[in-house]
Image (cartoon, rainbow, N blue to C red):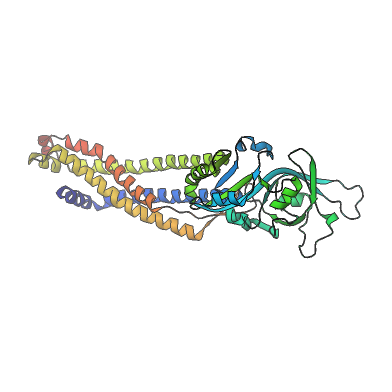
Amino acid sequence: MTLLMLATRNLLRNRRRTAIALAALVVGVGAMVVLRGLVNGQQGIILENIVLGQMGAVQVHREGYLANVQGSPLTLDMEDSEALRRRMAAVPGVVAVSPRLSFGGMLSMPEPEGAVDSEPRTAFLQVVAFDPALEPRVTPKRMAWLGEGAFLSKVDAPELMLNADLARSLRARVMDAKSPPPEEQWPALLAADRDGALNGEGVRLSGTLVSAAPGDRRVGYVPLATAQRVLRMEGRVTEYAVAVEPLERAREVRDALRASLGAGYEVHTWEEVFPFIAQILGQQDFLFGILSTVFLAAVLLGIVNVMLMSVLERVREIGTMLAVGMRRRSIVVLFLMEGAVLGLVGGVLGALVGGAVTLWLHHRGILLPAPGANVDSIIRPYVSFGYLGRSVVIAVVGAGLAALWPAWRASRLRPVEALSST
């Protein structure tokens, strides 16, 4: 306690130098906190678009499905039963389950009335079928991407939703549900069933979705029973999308679902289905770590300089303390405490300033145009209290280590030479 009080008093002796070192620490720690908040906000947007807007936190398939997903294998299907849904919903952490049927298809637009020798308007697309009553609980973000028209109405309705860009390229118009055109003017959805036979059904374009992520322009959505009729797969699905709350429990829920469902099924988290997204998030964290290390190192070099200046100015004082019997290790501890106190005060102030700026940015929001998408994302930076605490610890430890060399130099002084210095 005596050394701690002495270290605090020594820092207050040269208040200008201490203030400069504190300012550098506050800026450094505050910048780290704000930068971490921005990274968290951007990663949150990515996860929202992928997990809450497209696939769900966890997916359940027949064994071997994911290895052949590029071919959209309809033969790796499973029975859609209430008992299976209840078994998945009973797993702790699961908040919703939505059956889906994914397949490749072709959309053929009817010829305009009175047109002669008009060019055919067709497009190949990836079709995702789901129950309109269950899917919004798993991917609620998709509801916010409605551009025109209405969402799918019933599980067996002959309806279709398209990406807005794809609908525009096909010159397809949203059809009013109350007064739709004759069925012969509806687009035809064509797809091959499990045996390779081509089937089709006329569908009404109920609405369009804006592009919220790159790569979703060739995707269409139909009600689950409609897809089952087209593919002749009544009562069958190719996957279940599972909503998990909180999202951090996704791996825990995956393991519980594997144990509950047993052999014949495979369960994957969003990061296993889309590993490149997890890689992007990991690369962002790695780059943040490098930037934080470089920034903090530059700040700590300033503390080294401050402590060295303090040693040079207090040579006679150090010599006196050694002459009256203070141990050399006590000299080391004294200067380490000075660095630690400096790091503690600067770390706390920096964490408070950085947290306040991050909170202000969170409430204000940062508009970020997303490349390849028609929806601008609003980043809301945030940091956890745990990270704020770690920032303070890093500042204290870093400042203490920065004071280590000056402390060692001070402890190596000879009392006679130190007392004779001017």
- The residue that appears at 91% across and 55% down in the rendered structure is 114
State the residue in front, 124 or 132.
Answer: 132
Q: Judge whether residue 189 can be spotted in this image.
A: yes
Task: Report the side of 105 relative to 97 (left or right).
Answer: right
In the rendered image of this protein, does residue 416 appear above or below residue 101? above
Where residue 228 appears, as percent x and y from the top left, is 72, 48
State the residue in front, 73 or 215.
Answer: 73
Residue at the far bottom: name it: 178
Give the tally of numbered discs: 0
- The residue that appears at 37% across and 43% down in the rendered structure is 296
State the residue in front, 144 or 168.
Answer: 144
Residue at the far left: name it: 324
Q: Judge whether residue 48 can be spotted in this image.
A: no
Where residue 285 appears, as percent x and y from the top left, is 46, 42
State the residue in front, 360 or 194.
Answer: 194
Where residue 310 appears, as percent x and y from the top left, is 22, 44
Task: Report the side of 1 relative to 110 (left or right).
Answer: left
Task: Report the side of 33 relative to 197 (left or right).
Answer: left
Where residue 222 appears, as percent x and y from the top left, is 71, 52
